[in-house]
Amino acid sequence: MVRPAVQADLNRILKIYAGARRFMRQTGNPTQWPETYPARSLLEEDLADGRLFVIAEEERIHGVFAFAIGPDRTYAVIEDGTWHSERPYGVIHRIAGDGSGGIFETCLNFCRGKCDYLRIDTHENNKVMRHVVGKAGFRRCGIIYTDNGTPRIAFDWLEPDGKETKKQGDLF
């Protein structure tokens, strides 16, 4: 089940991100998320803006992600390619799980239910995420840069049947 995160979830969310950072280092991606990323202050900002979600089974949180519909400043400029559409889009950021499996699929089903056009990015060395994103039907679009100036490979996914994009207020 996907639900909006609440303040009481933050300690568990931080543990999930710590585990994700360890997993990234173990799988050849040591630099995408530094030891302090994402900072608690960023998660609190996501929480306040209604874009932080958890994947839970009963009371146990297994995954976390940020999702919002609307322009993302890091996607305003793309190099070495182009987006497949300029229509309104949803953005998935900072997805992580506790290793229980199915986190990306659950996140994706939720996001696809809210928006017919999605964008996501990942580090060049994040081979696991690149594989999962490609398997889910996302297409490589080019290179974007994060707020700290580091490059990321950008992908998008467009609903094949053309259903209309839902608005931000429809998230819950």
Image (cartoon, rainbow, N blue to C red):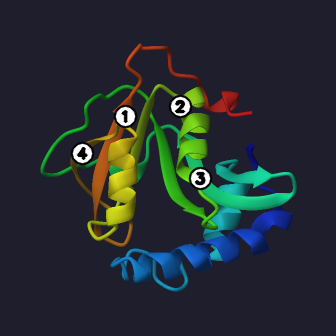
The answer to whether residue 61 is left or right of residue 28 is: right
The residue beneath circle 3 is 103
Q: Are marks 4 and 2 in contact (CB under 8 Å)?
A: no
Measured in 3D between alpha carbons, the distance from the residue under mark 1 to the one under mark 4, in whole angstroms, is 9 Å
Cβ atoms under marks 4 and 3 closer than 8 Å: no
Q: Residues within 10 Å of mark 4 (few under 14, many from 20)?
A: many
Q: Is residue 146 above or below residue 5?
A: below
Label 3: element kind: helix
Q: At label 4, which amino acid type do we have?
A: Arg
Q: In the rendering, which numbered label is found on residue 140? A: 4
Q: CA distance from mark 3 to mark 1?
A: 18 Å
Number of the front mark, 3 or 1: 3
Q: Residues within 10 Å of mark 2 (few under 14, many from 20)?
A: some
x then y, percent, for residue 103: 59, 52
Rendered image: mark on residue 112: 2
Q: Quadrant of residue 100?
A: bottom right
- Quote the CA–CA distance across marks 2 and 3: 14 Å
Where on the picture, by quarter, is residue 18? bottom right
The residue indicated by pointer 1 is 157
Q: Label 1 near label 3: C-beta < 8 Å?
A: no
- Answer left or right for 159 relative to 36: left
Q: CA distance from mark 2 to mark 1?
A: 9 Å
Q: Residue furthest left?
A: 80
Disc 2 and disc 1 in contact, CB within 8 angstroms:
yes
